[in-house]
Amino acid sequence: MEFTVGKLDLVRELSLTQGVVEKKSTIPILANILLEAHGDRLTLTATDLELGIRCSCPARVKKEGAGTVPARRLLDYVRLLPEADITIKFLENHWANLTCGRSRTKMAGMSRESFPELPVMPEAVAQIPYKQLSSMISRTVFAISMEESRFTLNGALLVLQDGAITMVSTDGHRLAYIQNVLADGDAHSFRALVPRKAMGEIVKLADEGTADDKVSLAGDDNHLFFKFGERLLITRKLTGNFPDYERVLPKENTHIATLAKLEIRSAIERVAQFADERSKAIRVQFSPGEVRVFSSSVETGESEENVPSEYKGPELEIGFNAQYLLDFLRAISQDQVAFALKDEKSAGELQPASTESINGHYRYVVMPMRI
Amino acid sequence: MFENFWGNAHVVRALRQMVASGRIPQTLLFAGPEGVGKATLARRFGQALLPHPERIENDDLSTPGRRADLLDREKLPADKRNDDPLLFASHPDFVTFPPDGPLRQLSIPQMRLLKERASFKPDVGSRRIFLIDHIDRANEQAANSLLKTLEEPPDHMNLIMTAENAYDLLPTIRSRSILFSFSPLSNADMRAFAASRSLADTERRIGLSGGCPGIAATLDLAIYDKRRSAMHVLLKVAAGASPFGAWMPFSESIARSKNEKLELYLKLLYELLRDMMVLRTLPHAEIRNGDLRRELSAIAERVSGHWIARAVKQVDEIAELLRRNIQKTIALDNLILELRGF
């Protein structure tokens, strides 16, 4: 195999594949990237067996073929080359010969035979704008469980139904739910658990596109496929029973406190410094006209703040994990936030609230803490 | 199916029926002596169940490549090993978790990784097989962190665990698995195995292997003889047939070889003690170390059955303490002194 490719093209595609390359030393072939030259394109493939990615860029192919080289080393080296064309030629012993200007390098590679086959993408079920998908992910990914002992679904639920796209994640203490209208509302219904690691890669790939670009989504029995133009991300699906989130979303939280996001966020950030380090518990007191946030701990001291609010409900004092509240307050772009409450013992719900129109439906449910 | 597998026909038959009926228990426990073919049969079972089975055999831990991997891991510091828990997965749906590190233990991070990996659907088909080799090498915390997975395995998961002795395990693990006991092979089976591999020194290897093909195939006779003569002298000295000074050169040579595991010596010591016990009761019976028959009889005559039982108990104790990284030579010196009656 022999081809010539622009340095910038190669660096860009190699960078996008790095997140998927296996770091484990015990399966050496997976630390390699598969390079395939065909027609007028170079295709790059990486996989860690759970996740796979295939990118491609234009290349002048002199002789078609395929070979693999260590992904990390190739990127580290190519990045240092001057901005010029790079010619790569694979030798009989699977080594790769790289030439660029006056630089000449031979890299130890491995035969492509042992590189795993990636599955073939079936017909797409939906087209989702890049920005929409990536904003849905960044608004739910933080609620995925990190703890070992908790109920561990290491991913988020993705549902397509009735022209809407929904993403839900939970760790058992809180739940993030976001729903958007799917512009060209396809009739396909679709439901799958997307692994957390794949979500991170999707956001990276979506960042490369423009506002009009759309992801093609597809799935077979075991895999999910996200096609970003010439780039394809494949992930194995997760199994597990996702909790019945419809039942978790509160229906009777009628006491609404609307607050300026920046005010309440910085109040909680400061007060949380004096919360118990493990539980991060703070108390939030809702009274007509204002919301008071306070914390106290035997070792560190105590702290409190008031934030004005149009709240007309009864006096309520609820314990929350400060970190959970902050995760949400940092994820929304609107300048107002609404707390919807029922009583001290029920879950509280947070939503962005704004005079400007809110795109989609974003809800966040947090369990109260007993303090 | 299961060609080139010798012995334990009852297990083979049961597995064959499972494959034929398509009903596979989600958790299997294979128990039996080392080298008898537990992991080998687990891999063959995987080959019968998974598409594209060729690569599964790459993860045979006795192959030179995998052995080198395990030795490389020993040199890593413990936190490196915890950051990158050991597993082999040459086949994407056949994942092997072997004991790791210089003490060859299964760690908590490995068991957590198993849980995480298990939640991913198969690459191809409807099944993923996870093999935990030497589950008896998991400490209590690691074993406990596996329980949840055993209790609610994902539908596509089949877990196979191997252990030398099922009764070394937590009862909670044993009760969650279907147990198959593997027994040592008959000499006829061993000969058939040796012939298929065209092993040299067949009779000697078969004699020493104790009916375990894996041992017969991988035994390095030169190293074996070196270790055995050390343990032979140890017994001679412990029984009072030689002065303590005779032991010193061996003690020093064991102390010098830092990377050599004492377990390998203890295993031989058990074998020698076993042969001595046999010789005491049935002087003409077949023993494993047949070439040492005269020497072992001489030692056996000097000691009582009670002495041998006491020796076994003390070796057990050393074997257990080894997991806490005790001083090898001091432990052996002490063993000798105790048995000499000091």
Image (cartoon, grey):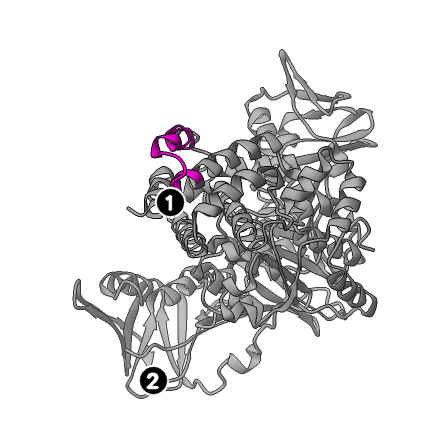
Residue A217 location (% of width, % of height):
71, 58
**Quadrant of residue B1 in the image?**
bottom right
Residue depicted at 74% across the width and 47% down the height: B190
Q: Nearer the viewer, residue A337 or B313?
A: B313
Please count the marks in the image: 2
Judge if badges 1 and 2 mark residues of a common chain.
no
Mark closer to the observer (1, 2): 1
Does the stretch in magenta take in B237? yes
Residue depicted at 28% across the width and 46% down the height: B342
The local crowd at label 2, few if under 14, some if 14 to 19, many if 20 or more residues have their Cα within 10 Å, is some
Report whether A160 appears left or right of B278.
Answer: right
**Quadrant of residue B251 in the image?**
top left
Characterize the magenta stretch by its predominant secondary structure. helix
Q: Which residue is mark 2?
A: A344
**Tag 2 secondary structure:** loop
Q: What segment is highlighted magenta in the picture?
A: B236-255
